[in-house]
Image (spheres, rainbow, N blue to C red):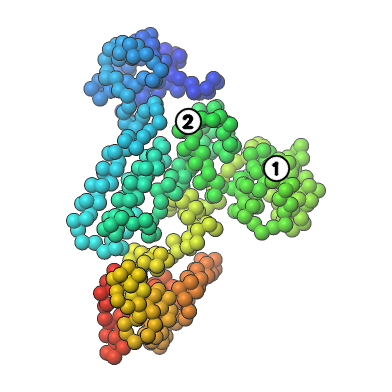
Amino acid sequence: MAFKQRGAQLGIRIVPHAERISHLLHADDILVFAEASRHNADRILNILDDYCGWTGQCVNREKSAILFNKRCPKWKQRAIARVVGVRRVDQFDYLGIPLVLRKLKVADFATLVRSAHDKTNIWGKKYLSYAGRALLIRSALLTIPAYLLAHTEVPSGVLNSIEKLGRRFLWQKDSNRGLGFHELAVWRGPLRARLAWTVINEPDSLLHKVVTAKYGADLWLPVRTPKCSATWRIIREGADALSTILRWRIGDGRSVRILHDCWILDRKIEEWLTFVNVEEVENARVCNLLTDSLEWNVEMVNHFFGPILAQRILEIGTNVGEGTDTPELTKSCFGSSLSAVAYRSKVQGPDCDFGWLHNLKLQPREKFHWWRLLWNAIPTNVWLHRRGLSSTRLYPWGCDMEENTDHCITLCHMLRKVVRILAKWGFALPQFDSLAAAMDGVACQERFEAYWDVPPTFDYCRYGLVVIAADLLDANSGALVLPSALWAVF
């Protein structure tokens, strides 16, 4: 108790009435916060001496450092540093995160970029297929800044540099398309969703107490102050990513927006095809639909939503959690992290044209081939002729047609011959007239099988590799022949 009382006046508050932060502990490290004064320095030293006497541990002054606010005069900084007996620094790393009292710059992350560059240099000495390179980029290179992205503000220039290294390693040259790779900026919000979930779901945590004391408990409320802290920007971006997988249980309805929050089933009303009078509920909250006793106002609900949707709303319980709106996840995190679930919801949402492709359990080579098809990066004669690498645009083996992606995937007479042979063997592959039609067919079948949880009627997952095999079948002998232009596919 005496120890607690002696340190009671130490620490800092970010706003009046907020929780006072005097220290943070992690394993055998400690961060101590206090106003820069000789008196506080002596008190901290006395407390640390008592602690070392009780535990038998001692402070490693060579590894310790003291950091001052830039508003503190230099003479005071030097005097306090001499009293404490540790070196004075402008920044230092703690748990891999740079701690500075200024906005981070690209130069602060030089070590991060150098680490990514060293990895690609080592990989470049090995012979790897395109699929192998893609796997290394996705699993080892793009994950380098993940920890920092979740906890601090990494400049966009740093993320672009790492993505550029990945593209150069993949193609052995500069490229503007990282096929099948997530953008690090897209990952940023989902990585920070865990911090937002802590603020929302753990009211007793120090993070919740400090953040809500300054900015309030509504993470989606626009910030009124022109300048906010980096911590708040990080949590707000995490909250935006979290909103795609969050559903609210209605307490008093004050925290839940009628149109823009999920509180009915697993989707926001703004994403439904309904006959809701949008203008009347545009900026309203669910509390406007409740009576003083926190029961549904039946007349108002029927007026806004019509009898069918109103019936579903009236079945939702209210006044849960002692009248406090509480969040819950719409998707299970079993076997995945919260960040992974938020990311999948983002990249497979309605705004992503080929998000369904992530649901197919493809081998790396097959997935990479699909992405090349989508980006028209298969080296057909049309593709090569456009780049001055081929003297003809025609298919070389008798079709008398231009060899483009649609020809390789759907129109080639040798392809159709392969499909007929496979049909005799019991593999019933569909026939399409273009790549776009093939993609629509695969997407429809994937959604049907995912919804009904039935085994696939045919192997759509490997359709791209099967159809490209038409170019590998010799018309006379039936033997497989590998044109040099298609080495990259296999």
Which residue is disc 2 drawn over?
A: 229
Badge 1 amino acid: Ala
Question: Looking at the image, which is closer to me, 200 or 119?
Answer: 119
Name the mark on residue 284: 1
Return the x and y of residue 28 as percentages of the image width and height.
31, 28
Work out whether residue 199 or residue 470 is closer to the camera in this orientation and state it.
Answer: 470
Task: Name the residue furthest top.
Answer: 39
Density class for disc 1 (Cα within 10 Å; few <14, some 14-19, many ≥20) is: some
Q: So how many labels did they put on this image?
A: 2
- Please give the name of the residue rendered at 31% of the width and 55% of the height, measured from the top-left corner: 174
Query: Relative to residue 150, is residue 304 drawn left or right?
Result: right
Could you tell me residue 399's position as x and y percent?
A: 37, 85
Q: Which of the two discs, 2 and 1, labels the residue nearer the N terminus?
A: 2
| Residue 270 on image: x %, y % | 64, 52
Secondary structure found at label 2: loop
Taking the spot 38% from the left edge, 57% from the top edge, the residue there is 177
Residue 218 percent location from the top left of the image: 59, 36
Above or below for 90 versus 480: above
Along the viewing direction, whichever of 201 and 98 lies nearer the viewer:
98
Residue 425 in view? no
Q: Tell me which residue sits at (32%, 27%) in the image.
A: 91
Density class for disc 2 (Cα within 10 Å; few <14, some 14-19, many ≥20) is few
Residue positioned 33% across, 46% down in the render: 161
